[in-house]
Amino acid sequence: MIIDGKKVPNGEVIQADLCIIGGGVAGIGMALQFIDSGLDVCLLEGGDFEPNPRTQELANGDNLGEPYYRLDHARPRYFGGGSNLWAGWCRPLDAIDFEKRDWIPYSGWPISREDLASSYVKAQQLCEVADKSFDALDWSYAMPDLYQVPYVNDSIQSTVWVGSTPTKFGKRYRHALADASNLRVYMNSNVTELVTDAPGGKITRSRVATLNHNRYEVQAKVFVLLPGAIEAARILLASKQGERQGIGNQHDVVGRYFMEHPHVVTAKIHLYNRKQSNRAVIPALDYRFIKGAKARLNLERPIDGVKFAYTIREQTQREKQLLNYSAHLRTVAPSRNSAGYRSLKLIVANMRSMKSFLRQVKNGGIPDGLGTQLKNLVLNPDDVFRVLYGQVFSRPKILELYCQSESVPNPDSRVMISDQLDELGVPRAVLDWRLSLLDKVSIRESQKIIGELLKQSGIGELVTEPWVMDDDAEWDRSLIGGYHHMGTARMGLNPKESVVDENCKVHSVSNLYVTSTSAFPTCGYANPLLTGLALTLRTADHIKELLTLDLELKHQQPAEVLPS
């Protein structure tokens, strides 16, 4: 059942066995696990089925650290959440990402990748990539030459991401949730605060507000907070009743260890003349006209719904004490920073097939809309022509190494709340995203390994960007993130360094869970949506077992015998 929260009577108290806060990928994924469970479940979604500027403004906040997107642009506040901006790329974390690595501070999960194995299978099904392999060798027919032997070796491997259509969770699973008799989805229902009992060890209710000034409460046996890593920290920190520092924050850990994958060009590869290097012909580097343009396009653009990157093998990571790392090869184009080029690249990147492209357009998956991107092409014809001319009629002389790497868990990289309040009276989020010297050093050493191989194999000379070589230099202003928000309520066994336990239950609260990407202790290099969903499904199994047992025990209790 789907209910508009604006129509819930003011002051109403709703009862449920389970209250899920957040109608994004994780919230929808969890709710689906409870259909026909015999448990009464309510899901609270702050937005509607389509974006609304007034609702979206509630996500606004401040950035203090590394330059970042506006917070209201990075967090879609309507049904489906992050899947509404998701490009569809799926890849699980590597086994090493879960390990305690002595060279990486605050690393180590309280679970292993194997503990998520069955949940990964279910997550792939929900993301509609269940039939796709994550073994790059299974995609060798689609793999560009530069990602194959002899351009990989015992230290460097090619890694594959597989593409979902992409699944827009709000549209894809709306009817399944609406038809479930034991599940109520409350739209336009923004959680403003979680309220605890007097000792602070149990959540008694969540306070909910709508933009038409309607307010009501939800009481439940179990609460799960799933609005994304920034909003989850914001709600925990803003819930000060009973705990001055916020819920689950006795050790000042909530909001800390925020992680995002740095996306940035970190090196250029100056290509050798093929005849002088005596290497094999590589169409992307050596051909012109249609054949060469197609090969260069395939180097950057998804091929058959997959894309590739260089990554560093686990044994080399251990030997060199590196963070996990990936880097994509791409050709250098003139006017790369122009609006016209960016729009052209965005359109091409989404055009895996005409069917998927039209679906992206229909579902609003093209950032700022297809109309805006086409307008940029029309208004910048010279830039677009130079790019197309260079791709078709010229052979590249330089390649770029575009990095998407793991970042170090850093307690000073954090989400806080400000004194400014949004329209509903909730303190706004403040993001202080920070990267460390270890992040830069690890990128530098990882690409050095790649550079040595490319030189030996006759491709070219890798030249690291000056700011990467300079320990004291700021990160390049072209640095961006991937809307990959992780780590503000991290998992762990030590409450002094984590917020939730191995089942994603808040250490100090008996009936509150925070899971998905918020709970990541480390982040690897892979896009986090698939792992965040898998972790959520694992938590759902744990909660279902507890609540089902509670329900069975109640049914087993003998009926009260009334006096005659």
Image (cartoon, rainbow, N blue to C red):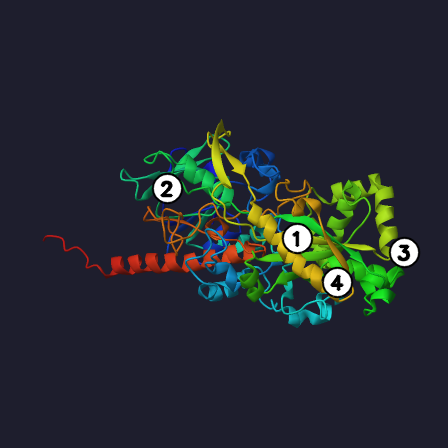
Mark before the other along the chain sequence, 3 or 4: 3
Q: Residue at x 53, y 41 (%)?
A: 47
Other-residue count near label 4 (Cα within 10 Å), few / some / many at <14 / 14–19 / ≥20: some
Residue named by callout 2: 251
Quote the CA–CA distance across marks 2 and 3.
61 Å
Quote the CA–CA distance across marks 4 and 2.
50 Å
Mark before the other along the chain sequence, 2 or 1: 2
Quote the CA–CA distance across marks 3 and 4.
26 Å
Quote the CA–CA distance across marks 1 and 3.
27 Å
Q: Nearer the viewer, mark 4 or mark 2?
A: 4
Residue named by callout 3: 393
> Which one is in front, 113 or 478?
478
Q: Is residue 445 above or below residue 479?
A: below
Instruction: Give the quarter of the image for residue 538.
Output: bottom left
Residue type highlighted by circle 2: His
Residue named by callout 1: 403
